[in-house]
């Protein structure tokens, strides 16, 4: 069995286990046999819980996690920055500020603000590159990261000011701001699907071009790659994917940073393999984080964004340690 196939099977098993945990965990712990009842069409309390609450939530978690994982992989490949992440580079904060502005000032529901979130993500990404002095994406990783921290702090400050100006209206998006999956996934999914599909198509087109870009801008250009088009398209793909994810579930940290690192450990550096692996790993991480948040202190819930940060930090600490072969 090849290493790539073994890695794919491992990620597939992880994703299946995460999905099972998401369906059975919650304020009411369901036995695995309830899934058989659902498949057989039985009319029971467990079936009602699965159909109306947990399946829609699971579907939303899978989509949001996959979008964040793929977006993180694209950022890291396009900027050649191992710290690239929609959260660290200000993209999540820009999308979040746009949604909070639309909801807090104009009364728009989060489900109506997908394209507003994409616009906020795009503006934040452009601001980060402008602050870092990287018009072609060639700024050192530390400069991009520091610029992302600055833009993130700016967006969070404005968002907090909006919240304090009208606390009652802001209550509608309070949980959403820390990253939370809601039970109305079937309502949100059709809204974010066009943005996700466009970002996915762009990702497929970009994968082989990102492999060339890894050789360096000069070498890639010598091989016929349009570096500017590739980087601009990468930014657009990230904006579409991360903007839709943030609009649906709020800013969830660490997923876009951790998933690509795990994918490269498992599948190598070929972006045609890394991108789908990162998407699957991101989906699994979000679903696991949501299941833990629901199971840790029922009937109360921890928002998925908080649990994801608690999971992502030790994962990144382990990934940061050099392998024995590198020591």
Image (spheres, rainbow, N blue to C red):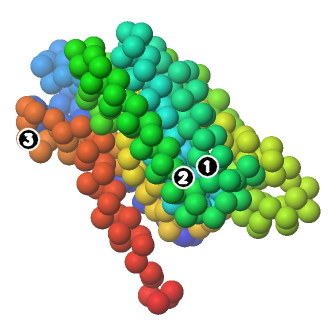
Element at badge 3? Answer: loop
The percent coordinates of residue 209 (x first, y second) are 77, 53
Q: Earlier in the sequence, mark 3 or mark 2?
A: 2
Q: Which of marks 3 and 1 is in front?
A: 1
Dot 2 falls on a residue whose secondary structure is helix
Residue at the (39%, 23%) spot, across then down: 100
Mark 2 crowd level (few <14, some 14–19, many ≥20, 10 Å Cα): many
- Give percent across and percent down for residue 147: 54, 52
Residue 273 appears anywhere in the view: no
Task: Tell me if residue 133 comes above or below residue 65 in the rendering.
Answer: below
Circle 1/circle 2 CB separation < 8 Å: yes
What residue is disc 3 on?
A: 297
Residue drawn at x 46%, y 55% is 257
Residue 246: image quadrant is top left
At label 1, counting other C-alpha atoms closer than 10 Å, the crowd grade (few under 14, some 14-19, many 20 or more) is some
Residue 165's spot in the image, x, y percent? 29, 19
Is the N terminus in the top left, top right, bottom left or bottom right quadrant? bottom right
Instruction: Give me the C-alpha separation between circle 1 and circle 2.
Output: 6 Å
Q: Could you say which is closer to the camera, residue 124 or residue 318?
A: 124
Total labels: the figure holds 3
Q: Residue at point 72% right, 64% down?
A: 214
**In the figure, 200 relative to 260: above or below?**
above
Determine the CA span between mark 3 and mark 2: 38 Å
Q: In this view, does 137 lie above or below 51?
A: below
**Is residue 114 visible to the viewer in this orientation of the structure?**
yes
Q: Mark 2 points at which residue?
A: 147
Crowding at mark 3 (Cα within 10 Å: few <14, some 14-19, many 20+): few
Residue linked to disc 1: 131
Residue 238 at x, y percent in the picture: 59, 40
């Amino acid at each position: 069995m090849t290493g790539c196939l073994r890695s794919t099977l491992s990620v597939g098993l992880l994703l299946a286990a995460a999905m099972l945990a998401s369906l059975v965990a919650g304020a009411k712990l369901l036995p695995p046999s309830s899934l058989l009842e659902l498949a057989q069409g039985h009319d029971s309390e467990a079936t009602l819980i699965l159909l109306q609450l947990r399946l829609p939530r699971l579907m939303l978690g899978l989509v949001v996690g996959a979008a964040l994982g793929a977006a993180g992989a694209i950022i890291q490949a396009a900027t050649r920055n191992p710290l690239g992440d929609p959260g660290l580079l200000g993209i999540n904060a820009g999308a979040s500020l746009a949604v909070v502005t639309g909801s807090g000032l104009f009364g728009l529901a989060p489900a109506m603000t997908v394209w507003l979130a994409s616009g906020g993500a795009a503006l934040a990404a452009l601001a980060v590159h402008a602050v870092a002095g990287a018009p072609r994406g060639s700024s050192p990783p530390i400069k991009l990261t520091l610029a992302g921290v600055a833009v993130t702090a700016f967006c969070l400050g404005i968002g907090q000011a909006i919240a304090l100006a009208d606390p009652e209206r802001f209550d509608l998006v309070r949980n959403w701001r820390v990253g939370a999956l809601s039970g109305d996934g079937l309502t949100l999914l059709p809204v974010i699907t066009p943005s996700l599909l466009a970002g996915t198509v762009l990702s497929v087109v970009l994968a082989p071009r990102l492999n060339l870009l890894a050789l360096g801008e000069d070498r890639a250009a010598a091989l016929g790659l349009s570096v500017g088009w590739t980087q601009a398209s990468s930014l657009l793909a990230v904006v579409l994917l991360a903007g839709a994810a943030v609009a649906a579930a709020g800013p969830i940290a660490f997923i876009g940073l951790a998933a690509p690192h795990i994918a490269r450990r498992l599948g190598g550096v070929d972006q045609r393999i890394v991108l789908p692996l990162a998407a699957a790993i991101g989906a699994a991480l979000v679903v696991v984080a949501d299941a833990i948040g629901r199971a840790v202190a029922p009937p109360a819930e921890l928002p998925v964004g908080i649990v994801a940060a608690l999971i992502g930090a030790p994962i990144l600490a382990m990934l940061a340690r050099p392998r024995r072969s590198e020591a």
